[in-house]
Amino acid sequence: MIMQFNGKIVAVVVAIVVVAAGAGAAVALMNRSSGDDYVYDAKAQFNVYGNANGDTDINQKDVEFIEDLAAQDTIDYEKNKLADANNDGKIDGSDADYVKSMIDGTAKKLYYINLDGNTCSFNVKDKHNLIPLHRTVTRTALILSSKDPNINIIASDNTATEAEFAADTKLPGFTNLGSSTAPDMEKISNLEESKGSIVVMLGRSATFASNIEETFKNSTEVQIMRVNTWEGDALGGMLTAGYLLSGVGYKSPSDGGSGKTAWDQAKAYEKWYLDIMNVISKNTKDLSDEQKKTCLITYLGTDVGGKPFTEVYSSNAGNSLRGKGSGDYENTLLCGGNNILNKFSGTADANGRQPWTMEEMAQYGKNVDVFIVLCKGMFYSANEFQKGEGQLRECFEGYLSPQTSIYMVSWEMNGAPEPLQLAYYAKILNPDNSEIQDLDIPGIWSGYLNLIGYSDVPGMSWDKLSFEHGPIHTTKAV
C-alpha cells in the first residue's frame, strides 16, 4: 500500500520528529513489486483467513459470503482463498462455522498470509508480549499496544535506543536484542522462560532473522509474525496484526467492549490513515503528467559538507536517486508528482537505487520543478537543516535549475507515520489544490501521537514533541 507512500530555489526545510483479498473492499491501496510502477487496487490487504468478502472486518457478512460460495456447484479456490477460514484446503459449511467461532471468541487458532506470502497459523491467547524488530515494526507495536492492557512490549532491537523511542516511558527496562537482521536468539529464549506468550514481529525473511522460525519451531510460547509495516502496505499489516492479537471475540464499546484493544487501535489507525490518503488520492489520481510538477527524489546518507555534486553523488553510494521499487519514488507518484526518473537509462536495484550518469543529470536536472531530499535527521534543529540546505544549493549548482525548489524531509517517516510524510509531499507537489492545502498537519500529527500513545503518558511534558517545537522546522510554510 501504501502501505506500504515532490521555481526559484526557495528551500523548504522540513524536519519531522516522531516519538516514537477479496473483492468488495472500498480501500484504495498501492500494491508494489520491485521494479514495477505502482498500481491502484481496490483490495484491502487484510489477509486473515475468514475475511471472505475482502473488506477490513470479519463479521456476519463473511459467514453469509461463505454460505453463498458453498452453495455453488464450483468454487474458484484461489480467488476465494480467504474464505477457507479453517485452512483445510476446501470451502464449505465448516468454514462458515469457523468464522462464527472467530466472532463469538471460541476460535483458538487463526490463519493468515504473512509478508512473505506464506500461510501461517497464530494461537489465540489472552495476553501477548511483543518483540518488535526494526523501527517501523516498533511503531506498529506501539499503536497496537498503547491502550491494550493485555499487550506489552518487552524487547526490541537497537531501534529502541534511538531518541524517538527512548523517550517512551512505555518501554522501561526492555531487553535489547541487538540487530534486527540477526537478533540475539538466546535472549529471546530467556524471555520465553520468564514471560511466555511472546510474539516476535519483524519484516521479510530474506532480510530479517531468516532462521528464527526454525529456531523456535518447537516452542509453544514464541510465535513469529511477519506483517507489512512499511514494505508496501503499512495499513494492511496493522489490520492483520491487530486482529491476530485481539480481534477474536471482539465486542464494540456499544456492545460492552472496552474500546481499547489492539483491534480497536488498528481500526482507529485505519480511519486516521484513510482520512489523509483519500484526500490525496481523490485530488491526484486523475492528473495528467502535464498537470503535475516534475520531480526527483534522493536519499542523503552522508553530509555533503559543501562538496560539489560530482564528489558526493554516485549511482551506488549512500547518496543516491530513488527509483522504481522504492516507496520513496512511488510516493511522489501517489502524491501527484511527475517523477522524471523514467528518463534516465538505468534500472533500479532491489533497494530502489537508480543508476544514472552525470550527463543524464546535467540534461534532465534542469527540468525538475521540485527536488525532494530525504535525510536522516528527525531531531535536527532548524539551523542544522538550514545549513544542510545551503550545502545542497552549492552541491547541485549547474545541475538543477535556479528555479528548482529544494525540500528536505526526514527519511525516517516510513511505516506507520508515512501518511504524515505524504501529506507534506502532497502539499509540496500540489500548491494550487485547495483541498490538499487544507490538510491539517498539526491535526494529523496530534492524531498520530494519540494513536501511538504518547498523549496518554501521565506526568510527561511533550513540549519538544508539539507541532510548534518538534515535528516541523521550515524556512517556508508547507
Image: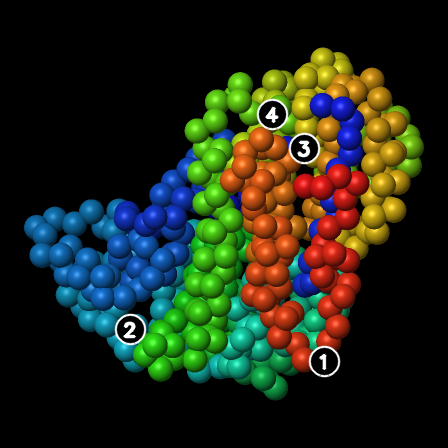
In this rendering, the answer to whether 246 lies above or below 336 is below
Amino acid type, residue under disc 2 in the picture: Ile
Sequence-wise first label, 4 or 2: 2
Residue drawn at x 48%, y 43% as measured from the top left: 279
Cα distance between the residues tagged 1 and 4: 46 Å
In the rendered image of this protein, does residue 341 appear above or below residue 53?
above
The amino acid type of the residue labelled 4 equals Lys
Counting residues from the start of the chain, the first of labels 1 and 4 encountered is: 4
Which is more toward the observer, 138 or 72?
138
Numbered circle sitting on residue 293 = 4
Report x, y in % for residue 447.
57, 61
Residue assigned mark 1: 459
Give the residue at mark 3.
297
Where in the figure is residue 240, as x and y percent of width and height? 43, 61
Locate residue 421 relative to residue 25 in the image: left or right: right
Tell me which corner region of the image, top left, top right, bottom left or bottom right, holds residue 428: top right
Local crowd at mark 3 within 10 Å, few (<14), some, or many (≥20)? Answer: many
Percent coordinates x, y for residue 319 in the rendering:
77, 35
Give the residue pinned by disc 2: 103
